[in-house]
Image: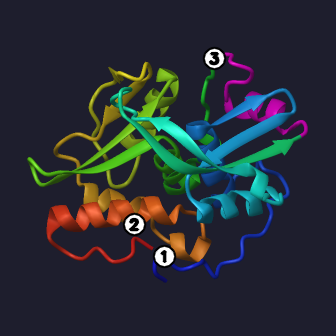
Amino acid sequence: MSDTDRRSTTIEPVGDLLASTPETAYFWGRVAGDGALSENCVTVRTEDETAADALAAIAGADRTDQAHRVAARESAHDASIVRFEEEFELQVFGPLADRASAALGLPIDGQPGGYRFDTFAEYRPQLLRGLLEACGTVCFRESSGSVGISFVHDEAGLLRTVRALLDAAEPHVPADGLSEASSGGHWFGLAEDADTAAFAQWVYADSDESGLYSADRRQKLRRSVEHATDAEVGELS
């Protein structure tokens, strides 16, 4: 299936969003990377309609046009650069926020988070895929002919957790240390000797079958890797 095609996979709602499944691993990766918990509400945002549909299906919620807008976003690395992108927002109301904060250590109402994702150890690719799409950046470095992959977030604690997840991944993905971003948050990138092609294949394995992916972000990573390696890497599916 092409990244530009509508997915044919039907995602079934998950009865318990805190159970350990590929769908919940992806869902909470997206929430942790670009979402928020407040009293009786979990909010998650995405810039891609395919991912928005997947997240809504997992939560058993209807996605409405009112949650679709064009938003201004500062560049993660340079606050002076602002781009305008589509944004889709999904909100799940009820006691889920309190339960997720207690079970996963996600921050609620601006409190510090502990970020405990051990329950998703079996589904690390899906969890990291959600995190990559939510707070990761991908670029092709013309100067070195390589792929740059980095993670940016306000919470340094989340980024330390992402680095630990990458360290335990198969294949192993070496990463640099944390730095402060000009936007006010923190960031780190994959190390220069990281095999970004192998990482791309691993993190998007079986994504076509599951339907758990952002078509735009997957395509950008695929094209960047192909440009850097001068080889076809398929659809990262």
Q: Position of residue 181 (x, y in %)?
A: 36, 23
Q: Position of residue 19 (x, y in %)?
A: 76, 50
Query: Crowding near pointer 3: few (<14 within 10 Å), some, many (20+)?
Result: few
**Does residue 194 sit above or below 234 in this rendering?**
above
Q: Which amino acid is tagged 2?
A: Gln
Which residue is denoted by mark 1 in the rendering? 4
Q: Position of residue 93 (x, y in %)?
A: 87, 41
Q: Is residue 201 left or right of residue 231?
A: right
User: Is residue 21 among what the camera can see?
Assistant: no
Front residue of 76/119: it is: 76
Which residue is denoted by mark 2 in the rendering? 219
Q: Which amino acid is tagged 1?
A: Thr
Magenta-colored stretch includes residue 96: yes
Disc 3 secondary structure class: loop
Q: Tell me which segment is drawn in magenta.
A: 94-112
Which residue is denoted by mark 3 in the rendering? 112
Q: Which amino acid is tagged 3?
A: Pro
Quadrant position of residue 195: bottom left
Q: Is residue 131 left or right of residue 56?
A: left
